[in-house]
Amino acid sequence: MAHINDVIDFQEKLGQWKRGNIRHLTQRKLQERMELLQEELNEFGDASRAQDMAEQADALVDLVYVALGTANMLGLPWEELWADVHRANMAKQRGVGKRGHKVDVIKPTGWEGPKTMGILLAHGY
């Protein structure tokens, strides 16, 4: 997935992080990452309320960029995790969900969710 490689290149260029194994971040670092994610989400909300498409697009890309950077800092096997979540999402159906929206995405009977912990364990967590 080219996007995570772009973010990894950015982080390595700035000496922010190197590739490595799955690891926990300090509470301070996690707080920094959550603040960055919230800042970008807030910017998306502001841009959405203003109907500013360019700012919405910028905020969404920045949000994904920060999320991917956080995943890299955690050493997550991103492509495998993505593929598994995508598999689980593709098994969902349209219908009325718990949010009460007339058209939502729901988990059908027998739906199997992502195997996140199994993937993490297979990668040394």
Image: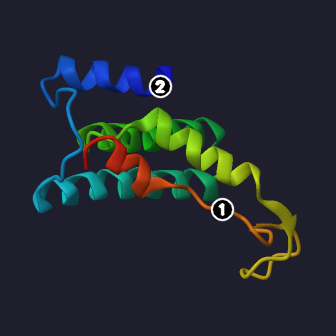
SS class, disc 2: helix
- Seen in the picture, residue 79 relative to 30 is either above or below; the reply is above
Categorize mark 1 by other alpha carbons within 10 Å: few (<14), some (14-19), many (20+): few
The quadrant holding residue 93 is bottom right
Residue placed at 51% from the left, 55% from the top? 115
Amino acid type at circle 1 is: Glu
Q: Secondary structure at mark 1?
A: loop
Left or right of 17, for residue 50:
right
User: In whole angstroms, how far apart are the C-alphas of marks 1 and 2?
Assistant: 27 Å
Q: Which residue is mark 1?
A: 112
Residue 51 visible, this orientation: no
Q: Say how many tags the image has.
A: 2
Residue 97: horizontal and vertical position, in percent? 78, 77
Q: Nearer the viewer, residue 123 or 27?
A: 123
Which residue is rendered at x = 56% and y = 56% of the image? 114
| Front label number (1 vs 2) | 1
| 113 versus 68 height, above or below | below
Q: Position of residue 19 (x, y in %)?
A: 22, 27
The residue that appears at 30% across and 58% down in the rendered structure is: 34
Q: Which mark is residue 3?
A: 2
Where is residue 15 shown, x and y percent of the image?
Answer: 12, 24
- Name the one closer to the observer, 33 or 53: 33
Which of 111/38 is in front? 111
